[in-house]
Image: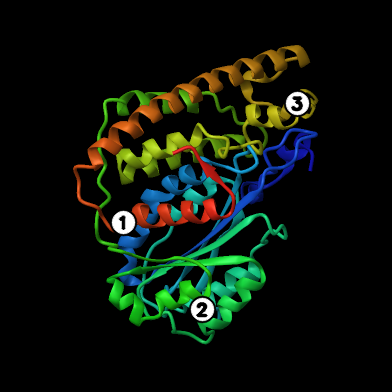
Amino acid sequence: MKLSTLFLTTAACAMMVSPAFAKPGEAAPEKIQVALLLDTSNSMDGLISQAKSQLWTLVNELSEGEKNGQAPEIELALYEYGNSNLSVSKGYIRQVLPLSSDLDAVSEKLFALSTDGGEEYAGMVIKTAIDELKWSDDADDMKLIIVAGNEPFTQGPINYQSACARAQKGGIMIDTIHCGSEEQGIKGKWKAGAECGGGIYMVINQDEETVHVASPYDDQLLDLNKKLNKTYIGYGAEGEARKMRQETQDSNAASMSVGSLLKRSKSKASAQYKNESWDIVDAYEADEEAILELDDKALPEEMKGMDKDARMAFVEKKTQERKAIQAEIKSLEEKRTAFVSEKRKEMADTKTLDNVMVSAVRKQARENGYEFKK
């Protein structure tokens, strides 16, 4: 679909998978596809809270890898299972979001999750994700399912061995995260699930809080994030709503911790954060001519009545503003990361989602040919 017709689409536009971040004539970057399968039964409030807090940590970690000199295109999907409010006939399983590179949509859906009692069928939710999602056919793309919960991995009508075999045929790895002790997870077959899925077995304390380490750069980074938002100019029928969604997801991240908002701002300064379906700057970068030819009715208020030259000048000015802010964020983030790393050496290790999941996924990315500078 041409960008010049995007303004005619409905809210379904937000659920589109963005095109690969390649210029004409360039090879598209390889993908990293990750499906998060989260237990949302009554006892999992801590898990959901950690997932909300650490979403941007996961995105940032994967964004820093390069393969063949290119950063990957990251697609995330989200499922919930084990919630009694979900359909019994579907095994208390719901696809919350299909594989998507729309990071604000992932955040929005994640923050809308709530917990309630139910039956947790790990094997069935894995099979459902394998069958429903649009997994890449390219053997070089990294495909990963991360399933987290606390009940025995053996529950439900689909045994985990069958689900693992199905995953292996599609080149999909399965990581398991048991919310509880390592011994209980082993007894409950969470380790066996990871082994048969070719993945990594992890355990977390879902009730442990992730500690934010304050740095001298925090306030400046938060201010830069606000300035970055001002470079986003919504266009078309969904532009204003999507711009508001961006600000809402900033607020959601901030509601978890200052650290969570800082990690989100880092993601927004990366190549992964693309919003060509509603932002005039990203859309212009993706298809310059389409924006120059766009119907005046689809333009944002500040651009209405502009001719082609005026449009080009306006958008290119915003582009340069954004790039300068993103560069400043990246520079300060490097200093903040170094500062926090030193401080964390003095702190005890925690079994939180960021510590176990992020290190595991980075290890698997390396095994898939990605290189990390640090």
State the image coordinates of residue 138 (x, y, percent, origin top left). 72, 57
Observer-nearest residue: 289 or 171?
171
State the image coordinates of residue 55 (x, y, percent, origin top left). 43, 49
First in sequence: mark 3 vs mark 2: 2
State the image coordinates of residue 40 (x, y, percent, origin top left). 40, 68
Q: Residue at x 77, y 28 (%)?
A: 294
Q: Secondary structure at mark 3?
A: helix
The image quadrant that residue 9 belongs to is top right
Q: Secondary structure at mark 2?
A: helix
Q: Quick check: 73 left or right of 150?
A: right
Q: Amino acid at mark 2?
A: Gly
Q: Secondary structure at mark 1?
A: loop
Quarter placement of the N terminus:
top right
Observer-nearest residue: 38 or 5?
38
Crowd class of label 2 (few under 14; some 14 to 19; many from 20; radius 10 Å): many
Residue 288, disc: 3
First in sequence: mark 3 vs mark 1: 3
Mark 2 = which residue?
A: 123
Using the rendered image of the protein, determine whether residue 84 is visible from the camera's viewpoint. no
Asked if residue 261 is positioned above or below residue 321 in the image, the reply reads below
Q: Amino acid at mark 3?
A: Glu
**By what rule are the colours in the image chosen?**
rainbow
Mark 1 = which residue?
A: 352
Q: Quick check: 77 left or right of 210?
A: right
Crowd class of label 1 (few under 14; some 14 to 19; many from 20; radius 10 Å): many
State the image coordinates of residue 345 (x, y, percent, origin top left). 23, 42
Using the rendered image of the protein, determine whether residue 54 is visible from the camera's viewpoint. yes
